[in-house]
């Protein structure tokens, strides 16, 4: 399909997500994300002069409750985890397909149930995320799509391994000053376990979220194999007492209060472990071995690997320029335009108003 045939641009995300741990966000924890995403790419409908819409259950005369009910579930975090990697019921899929017919769907962190429906009905989409190379001067968007010629054009603005590795090397060099002057030096042969937020799609396994029992067992296995194991909490986790309780059950595990990039840069750490933290992808650029408990499909590539169609590739910020989308969607530009806007360091980081690492 060409841009002239799209009837509109539809912005979408995980509209069935529920977070029971945050009652104030239970109705729609993704409301902020979709509003941010809609404005971040607000120029796309203008480029092809088409209307824009946001996908919600109400747009197909449904509610999240009715969709869960048809799947035999009641709205809850546990129900969301069950449905996340599954097929939606036939009625819901048909209603979504009718609403999205002829649209180009722009998604922020697409759930498996939505991707499966779009693929089944041949609806074109571009799916974005914040790529886990967060030690660059600014965050980078990751992108994947079911449109072959779009994928080829995104490859033209891909951030390459050499550039990513250079920034990792610079940061590792910077961290040496802190590591060598730290009063609490890390013993050689140590392991770090990276915590995560309590409700995260990457924690879903066989229709349920990994819980603290899984973490306790994983930490026990690590302490049985290695002498020194450290727990590094997630900077945005709001369940610190819960996690402290888990760690306290294993006296061989120590709480680590260090910047994660100082941890990755410390050669005394021989292994970086986690259930499914994206730090595992960053660690490879710092020369660290990794271990994960998760068996899910890997959404990001390892160093020097070619990305599969279902994996995100990191792209340069000129993807936010109107001229790039004219190149992507229209026949007005035949070759990749030069980046004309030079964003200040941290522009996307400030835009999303959430900081990881440094």
Image: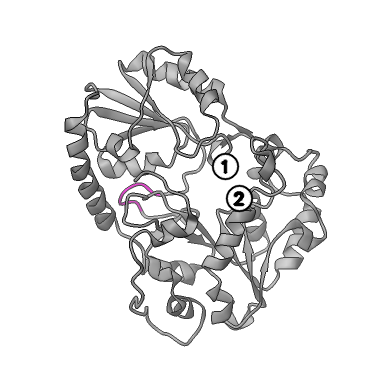
Disc 2 and disc 1 in contact, CB within 8 angstroms: yes
Q: For residue 51, what is the image quadrant?
A: bottom right
- Height in image: 107 above or below 189? below
Q: For residue 200, what is the image quadrant?
A: top right
Q: Which mark is residue 101?
A: none
- Height in image: 285 above or below 291? below
Residue drawn at point x = 68 percent, y = 34 percent: 78
- Residue 231 is left or right of residue 64, and the answer is left
The residue stretch that appears in magenta = 301-305
Magenta part, dominant SS: loop
In front of the other: 136 or 117: 136
Residue 110 x/y as whole percent: 58, 54
Display colour scheme: one colour
Secondary structure of the residue carrying tag 2 is loop
For the question of whether residue 173 can be seen, the reply is yes
Residue drawn at point x = 61 percent, y = 59 percent: 34
Q: Which mark is residue 111?
A: 2
Between the C-alphas of marks 2 and 1, the distance is 8 Å
Per the image, the residue denoted by label 1 is 201
- Residue 60 is left or right of residue 210, and the answer is right
Residue drawn at point x = 21 percent, y = 22 percent: 188
Residue 303 among those drawn in magenta = yes
């Amino acid at each position: 399909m060409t841009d002239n045939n799209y009837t509109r641009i539809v912005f979408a995300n995980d509209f069935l997500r529920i977070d029971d741990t945050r009652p104030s966000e239970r109705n729609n924890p993704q409301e902020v994300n979709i509003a941010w995403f809609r404005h971040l790419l607000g120029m796309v409908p203008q480029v092809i002069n088409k209307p824009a819409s946001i996908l919600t259950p109400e747009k197909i005369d449904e509610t999240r409750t009715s969709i869960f009910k048809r799947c035999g579930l009641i709205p809850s975090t546990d129900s969301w985890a069950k449905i996340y990697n599954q097929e939606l019921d036939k009625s819901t899929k048909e209603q979504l397909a009718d609403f999205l017919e002829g649209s180009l769907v722009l998604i922020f962190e697409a759930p498996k149930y939505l991707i499966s429906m779009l693929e089944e009905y041949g609806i074109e989409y571009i799916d974005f995320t914040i790529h886990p190379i967060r030690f660059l001067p600014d965050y980078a968007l990751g992108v994947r799509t079911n449109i072959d010629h779009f994928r080829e054009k995104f490859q033209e603005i891909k951030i390459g391994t050499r550039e990513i590795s250079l920034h990792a090397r610079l940061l590792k060099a910077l961290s040496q000053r802190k590591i060598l002057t730290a009063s609490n030096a890390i013993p050689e042969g140590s392991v770090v376990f990276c915590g995560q937020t309590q409700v995260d799609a990457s924690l879903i396994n066989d229709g349920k979220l990994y819980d603290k029992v899984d973490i306790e067992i994983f930490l026990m296995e690590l302490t049985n194999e290695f002498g020194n194991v450290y727990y590094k909490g997630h900077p945005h986790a709001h369940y610190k007492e819960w996690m402290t309780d888990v760690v306290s059950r294993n006296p061989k595990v120590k709480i680590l209060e260090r910047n994660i990039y100082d941890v990755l840069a410390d050669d005394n750490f021989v292994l970086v472990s986690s259930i499914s933290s994206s730090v595992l992808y960053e660690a490879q650029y710092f020369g660290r071995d990794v271990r994960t408990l998760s068996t899910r499909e890997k959404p990001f590539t390892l160093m020097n690997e070619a990305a599969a169609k279902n994996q995100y590739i990191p792209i340069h910020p000129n993807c936010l320029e109107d001229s790039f989308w004219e190149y992507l969607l229209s026949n007005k530009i035949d070759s990749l335009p030069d980046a004309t806007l030079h964003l200040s360091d941290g522009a996307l980081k400030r835009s999303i108003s959430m900081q990881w690492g440094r």
